[in-house]
Each structure stands twice: as C-alpha cells, then as structure tokens.
Image (cartoon, grey):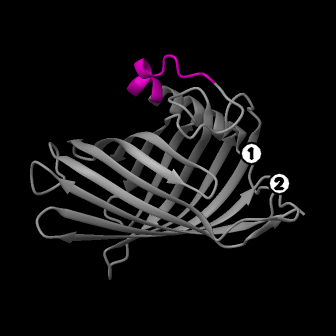
Amino acid sequence: MPTTPIFKARTVRTAGRLIAAGLRALLIGPLLAGSLTVSAQVDEDRLGAWYMLFWSAPFEDSRWGLQGDIQHRNWDLGGDLEQLLLRGGVTYRPAFADVLLTLGYGNITSEAFGADDRETDEDRIYQEALWSQKFGARLFLRHRFRFEQRWVENQDFRTRFRYNLFVDVPLNRNDLAPGAVYASFYNELFINGQRDIGGGRRVDIFDRNRTYLALGYSAWPGLKLQFGYMLQMTDDVEKGQLQLSLHQSF
C-alpha cells in the first residue's frame, strides 16, 4: 500500500512559490524570455535552471540555530517547473568537534516535463552532519553526510543516503571574507535505501550524481552569491542546469 505523506503543506508551498518566483524575477527576469516551449519528454539538450536561497541563523551565545532553503527548479530557464523544494531544520554545533548537526523537514512538489503539470508531493525528514576543513592557504573543504526518510505520493516509504564534497577556492585573497571572488565546486552522490517502492516497482541502488562548478562572490558579511553550472546524472537522464544561489547567514 502506498504510504500517505505525513504533512500536506499547501499553504507553505504557495508561499514558497511566491518567494521563489520573486527571487527569480529579481535576479534573472531578462533571461526568461522565450523559454516556455514544452515537449512531451525530457529534453536533455535543453538547459534547465535552479534558483535558490539558502539561509542560516545561529542563535546568539548558543550552539543551536536554524537553517533552511527555498529552491525553484525548472526544466528550462523558467516557466516549466521541475520542483519546488522548501526545507528547514534545527542545527546544533557540539563543543567537541568542528561539525554542524541538523535535524530537518522538507516538502517537495514535483511536476513532469512539458505540458503535463500533474504534481507529485513528497514529505521528507532528514539528519545531516557537515564537517569543515582547510588545507593550505586557500583550499576550503566541507563534507556533508545526509540521511533522508521520504514519503513520496503513491509510493511506499523510502530512505536515501547522500554524500556531498564541497570545495571553495578564493581567487583574490586567502579567505572568503567580504570582497572575495572564489571558485566553487561540489560533487554529490545519492544512494537509495529501500529498493521496492510499491506496486511491483523497484529502483536501483544508485539514484543520481551531481557535479557543480561556479564562480562566487562574498558581497558583505553573511551574504554570498554564486552562479554556475550543474550536471545531474541518473540512469535515465543526463541534464545540465544553470544554478543561481544566494547564501545568507544572519
């Protein structure tokens, strides 16, 4: 039997759509003209675009905090929604290690490619550990380990494991302080837990891989901007995405 999603956050998704659309229009409105052509199946040659806001808010004089992100993912440059992702969590930084732990929840609305706008909803709980390193004068690394519990509409309960290696290299100075221009890279591997998803359907152990390269700018304390390209590969599709992201720490 398919498992019913544990939350139905229609109002939250509507607010997320408005925020994401406003962010997208503000940052890249002139690029969207002529991008609304649709097709019956995924066009791997058509460039997609993801517009993202990541935020974090550590509590003052505390090891606790909050973080989250809003992502408006498109099959094209804009107008053909692939996913709207809303995610938030509680963070904790233990005293004994340079690691940030997160317990969070995400709601994901997915749409098919092209004119088919039928939606699939997903509710997700996740646990995450983010570990930072520095090598030499300019090589900043972060390792992110994430475990997800997923309730996808019309599927059985699923789990997934993720590992992401982030690399940032400042180009005009030795740190990522305001004024820094930096190269940013990541590679993320997704591994499925449960392979039987209901109705006689099975998924592979390998879910997907993402490789990203971007140029970033540290605008002022707590705010960074990145613009880059991400290649996502699954067993069925290999598709490129432009990515424009704001990273705000309060």
Instruction: Where is residue 88? Give x, y as percent.
Output: 53, 53
Q: Is residue 222 above or below residue 22?
A: below
Q: What's drawn in magenta, residue-wise? A: 24-37
Of residues 205 and 61, the one drawn nearer to the viewer in this rendering = 205
Residue furthest front in the image: 45
Residue furthest bottom in the image: 96
Instruction: Where is residue 34? Give x, y as percent.
Output: 52, 17
Could you tell whether 22 is left or right of 81 in the image? left
Q: Is residue 32 visible?
A: yes
Instruction: Where is residue 95? Give x, y as percent.
Output: 32, 78
> Helix, strand or loop at disc 1?
strand
> Helix, strand or loop at disc 2?
loop
Of residues 121 and 186, the one drawn nearer to the viewer in this rendering = 186
Hey, what amino acid is under mark 1? Answer: Thr
Q: Which numbered tag is attached to residue 153?
A: none
* Residue shown at 64% from the left, 71% from the top: 205
The residue carrying pointer 2 sits among few (fewer than 14), some (14 to 19) or many (20 or more) residues within 10 Å by Cα, namely: some
**Which quadrant, please, contains the N terminus?**
bottom right
Displayed quadrant of residue 4: bottom right
Dot 1 corresponds to which residue?
A: 120
Q: Which numbered tag is attached to residue 154?
A: 2
Mark positioned earlier in the residue sequence (2 or 1): 1
Of residues 232 and 66, the one drawn nearer to the viewer in this rendering = 232
* Residue shown at 42% from the left, 22% from the top: 31
